[in-house]
Image (cartoon, rainbow, N blue to C red):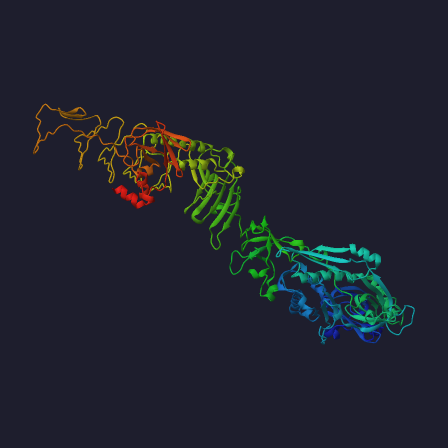
Amino acid sequence: MLRAFVGALDQNNRAIRFHWGRHQDALAHVLVPQSIDLTEGLCVGIEGHLTCLSSRPDLPLSAFLGLPLSVQLMTDRGKPYPINGIITDVRAGQSDGSLTCVQLTLRDAMSILDQRINSRTFRSMSVPDILETLLHEWQQRSSALAQAFDFELVLDRNQYPKREQTRQAGESDAAFIRRLCRRDGIFWYTRAGKHDGAAADTPVHTLVFCDDPTKLPQAAAGHVPYHRGTQSRERDSVTLWSAARALTPGSVRRASWDYKTGRIAQSEQETIVDQGEAGNDLAKLLADSVIDVPHAADSDADHERLAKARILAHEHRAECVHASSDVRDVSPGFWFTLAGHPEVDTRPEEQRQFVVTSLHHRATNNFSKALDERAQVLFAASRWSFDALPVEEGAGVRYENTFVCVRRGVPLTPAYDPRVDLPPVHPFTAKVVGHDGEEVHCDELGRIKVQILGLRADDHAHAQGAGTSGTERDSAWVRWVSPWAGPNYGMDMLPRAGMEVLIDHLHGDPDKMVVTGVLHGGPNMPTTFSHTGSLPGNRYLSGIKTKEVKADRYNQLRFDDTPGQISSQLASEHTYTQLNLGYLTEPRNDGKGAPRGDGLEARTDAQAVIRAAKGVYVTAQQQGRAEGKMLERTALQTLIEQLQELVRNLGDASAANDADNTDLARIEKITSQIKGWDAGSNVDQGGGGSGGAPMVAIEGPAGVTVVSQDAMVLGAQTNIDAVSAGNTQISVGRRLLMRVGDWMSAFAAKGMTLVTADGKLRIEAHKEDVVVKAAKRIILEAGEEIVFRSPKVNTQASDEASINGGSSYSQWNGGGVVHGTSGVWREHAASHSLVGPDNKPVKAPDPLTFKELEQQDSLAVVLRSHPNDGRPLAYEPYTLYKGAAKIADGVTDEHGQLIIANHQKGTSSYTVKLHNGHEIEVPVMEGGLSDDDQLAAQGWRAVDGDPESRQRHAQG
């Protein structure tokens, strides 16, 4: 009985067999398959349950985990058809003492890769590069997996661009691979054996990645016959053939914002599938329109490729065939030719070829009925319920499969839906990195580089550590969120190396990282404004503080919201330059700072400049709560107008007293500029743009003090008007030196005192006269002596001259000369001559010189009865006209001269009207008369206009 049982578990004559490779001798008779339930498919791999019988109840289950196994189905041609995989689960069932049931789970290598969750970064690699790197690593790191699987890339590598960064984000290796393949339109399947067909000592299966369905191999079955279920047949056949159609979108539209070029990349693809009249009509509305992640593709051509992959995926779903058969040697990823089907046979050869996309195997082994019954009892006791195929005594193997296939050439592109296929990603932290010690590292778009913290260095050894190196090689350029970003304007504060940043993802895509913020932490403590204090003590302080690159100095904009003590500061530690506003204190420590004052302070240890192209107004006038116009200057304007009027009045008095005219032009100009200072600005837009004079005005209602520890220079290119309505006091500790390049005039309406307490008072005229004039008397008083020293002394008095010395005197007048003395009259002379009476008129004072007239902007006109030697019209009343306007009344002096004051250049002539009604036209020639003009004005005639004859006549 026992021998019979052992013989029953012999695999040699079984239709379903296990092959363990190098472990075949040890395991061939330990486990024998009783039934199988396996599925295979494109983009899903292999998974199934193998229900087995064993004569050993003490099997070490863990010894089977990870072993490669080949399930071999004997075909109708007597050849084994292998389905190779890896045992991932082992489950022991019940035992009756001599027979034990065991259930194995067989999967492909991708299921193993599904067990490892990882995060890593791939830099500058294409999808084929990533697949190759990842699968090679598995082979290198796991000897068990290396002997169980291989891989092959049947891909057109040229169409897959190298992407700056591809991230595996907290997902399994298998999920990561599936996501990349689905996005790029790559399908995959498993094939028994090594990728190059070489022999192996273990059951190996190959993961095949493909992007062209025309490159798929033909199945071992070759031509597969079709027979209805009731027909007798000699070969395994297809027994059910059911075509299917599905309504799918008629178009695909993809749009992706390209922030580099500032435009939307768009691609639209139309389906080529004919879905019937109504179906085509509906398909027009079933547009698959998706806004992709920004910069989804490497180029427009790459974006077209990705969009085409989406429409091909829909076309893949549009039609298929559901079939059943007992053909054991067809499998997903292989194509066969159907023969004997009444409808299919009418098609051309290429349309009778079909690619299997999914396959479900069910089979029971050819055990005896008695052994099957014992097995069923054990299965029931183990509570394993499955739909087993019926078994009859002496019957052959019971096998059936169902599969789905499509015409060869129909797209096999997998579907990709970012809403489903992208892994769930959440914000996480990273560290900013830079190039070769650079503290601030960015590109022309202001993007930065980051290192994702926590990645394993071993996973990045293939790229020489890029991803975990702590350098700019660890990531692609990453954009960061700014409160404001416009074309060449915005708010930019580049995160610096070492800062901890918060990373989020655009559209939930792990490859599209964006920095949303910067975080404080242990290495990056909160800001200490002015290098002083800390939190929570200084919690009322806020603002921005930067750090000098590769140094520790700062710039800062600090706001202090301490109750009752608010202030602001804009500061640079370079030369300690600061603008302090509000309630000023020393830098706060633990929230406390000594008061420094109230208001505004601008200070620096270097130079300071206030520059304004349209004027600077410095005032101490109050403007409560900052209300009113910026250039509110009513008080300034009123005062300058009052001072201008004072200058005018005193100037008129000065001119009336022959103390020179006063130039009002400059003070009038400044007064006008102050009045219209804001014309054309936003407070006086109708001002015509005439305001905004580039001047400086300083006003202090309570006073203005300007002092210096050294020298002070007060200067002007034109005029300096010093005006005070009260006193102007100049006090000099040592010397007062006044230097005048042209003319000096001093006028006092009510008197003038010039006193020197010690030392001489010296008045000199080195080239001209000294004239001392008084309306009444001139008193010369000296404590010792009055000395007149000159080559000539000329004393003139129109009425009388008196000399009184002691008790002696001398009087001189028109009536005679009287001398008197109570003492001796002594005269010394070589001789005395008394020749009779004589007299000499008193010489009149000289008229004003040309230079004096020019300084006073005046003209001098001498009126004579004849131009040459005529009598001067002395003391002649006259009225002066400019055009038709009377401008002055007066009397000529003893020389017949009158003065035209305040002459304005450009006036061509004046008219003098005498008291007898005679009018004299006085032409004005700017620049003076030539010698000939002067002779002509004196009345000398020229023969035929010859200037030389005029000169000869004048010379006599």
Q: Going by the image, does 835 lie left or right of 482?
A: left
Q: For the N terminus, give its image quadrant.
A: bottom right
Q: Percent position (x, y) of residue 802?
A: 17, 26
- Any part of residue 532 in sight: no
Residue 76's x, y, as percent?
Answer: 84, 74
Q: Is residue 653 above or below residue 42?
A: above
Q: Is 515 or 689 nearer to us in this picture? A: 689
Quadrant (top left/top right/bottom left/bottom right) for the C terminus: top left
Q: Nearer the viewer, residue 409 or 597?
A: 409
Is residue 404 shown left or right of residue 254?
right
Pick whichever, 243 or 855, lies toward us: 855
Relative to residue 304, is residue 38 drawn left or right? right
Location of residue 844 (image quadrant): top left
Residue 245 location, quadrant: bottom right
Position in image of residue 596 (x %, y %)? 44, 39
Q: Residue furthest front?
A: 944
Q: How many marks?
A: 0
Q: Quadrant of residue 248?
A: bottom right
Regarding residue 124, the answer to whether it shows in the image is yes
Tell me: residue 260, above or below residue 349.
above
Q: Of 655 and 626, which appears nearest the observer?
A: 655
Residue 688, x across and y down, in percent: 52, 39
